[in-house]
């Protein structure tokens, strides 16, 4: 009977440390991650749209596995996460870093395209155009150069530079012209010369007769309103002066001068608005031809460009 307490003490003294050691070992085993697991988890967060989590996980991958060959792709994906979150300046900084070491790989090419898009989203269209020109100068691959010229054409379309767009699309190699539907695009761009326009100076001159400029711009209700208001005020001022009510006539004349000047200004502005609307409608019809979808598809060796055409 005297042995039992000692036996119990030995079990506790030996067993508890063993249990703690096993639990600690198991905990350390669960916390151990490899490069593949970390990269897959980071990519899963990006695919799920959790861009901030994806950035953290890709940066953790870069920090813990600096020798992994997927480091460039991980950096690229952090740029994509910023781009998807609308942080175009941060995205451009990452893509620009990758283009500085351009070696012509699919990932390098895609970094140039994303750099251009990031600049375009910031309103830096000229810089976006320059990015693509740099890619054309650096690349020796026909498909990449043609894709750059295609995207250059659309940047020119966005700026209303129809001739520049036509030249960019026309520079696509013969072997890829069907793929990018160049013939249809050039035919559509030829219609730019038929865009109806109103000349602001003509609208202003016609507004010497109140409402004439608005009538020229097809703003019939505004034309009638301008004519009636100005005619009414002119008649009222005339009557006031005719009745020798000079103070009243002066006030009405001053008010009429403001309406008359506004009538001219409104006609000139209306001409500009008419032109903007017609150009926007034409650009929208052109944009319906953007049938090419290009994306980066991750593969074990690195990355591959995927081209999808809608027919």
Image (spheres, rainbow, N blue to C red):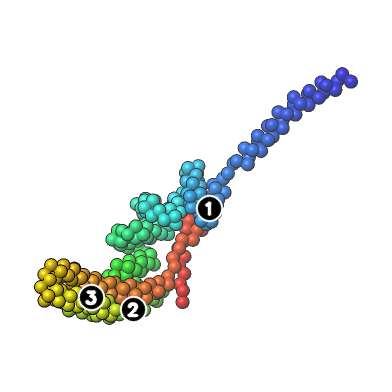
Q: Secondary structure at mark 2?
A: helix
Name the residue rendered at 23%, 71% in the picture. Answer: 266
Q: Residue furthest top?
A: 2
Q: Which mark is residue 303?
A: none
Nearer the observer: mark 1 or 3; the answer is: 3
Q: Is residue 99 visible?
A: yes
As drawn, is 193 to the left or to the right of 293?
left
Q: Nearer the viewer, residue 16 or 51?
A: 51
Residue at the (81%, 21%) spot, across then down: 6
| Displayed quadrant of residue 86 | bottom left
Q: Is 239 in front, or is 196?
A: 239
Choose the circle earlier in sequence order: 2 or 3: 2
**Residue at which label 1 appears:** 45
Residue at 22% x, 78% y: name it.
227
Mark 2 neighbour density, 10 Å: few (under 14) some (14–19) many (20 or more): some
Give coordinates of residue 32: x percent, y percent.
59, 41
Q: Which residue is mark 2?
A: 188
């Amino acid at each position: 009977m005297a042995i039992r307490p000692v036996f119990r003490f030995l079990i506790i003294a030996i067993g508890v440390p063993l249990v703690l050691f096993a639990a600690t070992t198991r905990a350390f085993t669960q916390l151990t991650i490899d490069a593949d697991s970390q990269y897959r988890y980071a990519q899963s967060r990006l695919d799920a749209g959790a861009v901030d989590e994806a950035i953290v996980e890709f940066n953790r991958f870069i920090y813990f596995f600096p020798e992994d060959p997927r480091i460039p792709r991980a950096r690229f994906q952090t740029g994509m996460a910023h781009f998807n979150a609308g942080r175009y300046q941060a995205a451009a900084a990452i893509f620009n870093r990758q283009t500085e070491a351009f070696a012509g790989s699919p990932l390098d090419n895609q970094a140039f395209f994303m750099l251009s898009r990031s600049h375009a989203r910031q309103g830096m269209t000229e810089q976006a155009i320059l990015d693509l020109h740099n890619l054309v100068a650096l690349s020796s691959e026909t498909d990449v150069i043609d894709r750059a010229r295609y995207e250059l054409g659309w940047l020119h379309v966005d700026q209303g530079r129809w001739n520049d767009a036509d030249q960019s699309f026309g520079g696509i190699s013969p072997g890829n012209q069907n793929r990018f539907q160049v013939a249809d695009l050039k035919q559509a761009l030829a219609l730019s010369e038929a865009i109806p326009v109103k000349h602001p100076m003509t609208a202003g001159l016609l507004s010497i007769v109140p409402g004439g400029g608005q009538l020229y711009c097809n703003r019939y209700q505004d034309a009638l309103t301008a004519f009636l208001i100005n005619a009414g005020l002119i008649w009222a001022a005339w009557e006031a002066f005719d009745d020798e009510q000079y103070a009243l006539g002066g006030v009405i004349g001053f008010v009429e001068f403001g309406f008359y000047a506004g009538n001219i200004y409104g006609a000139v502005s209306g001409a500009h608005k008419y032109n903007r609307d017609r150009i926007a409608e034409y650009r929208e019809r052109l944009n319906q031809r953007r049938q090419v979808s290009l994306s980066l598809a991750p593969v074990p060796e690195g990355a591959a460009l995927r081209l999808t055409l809608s027919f």
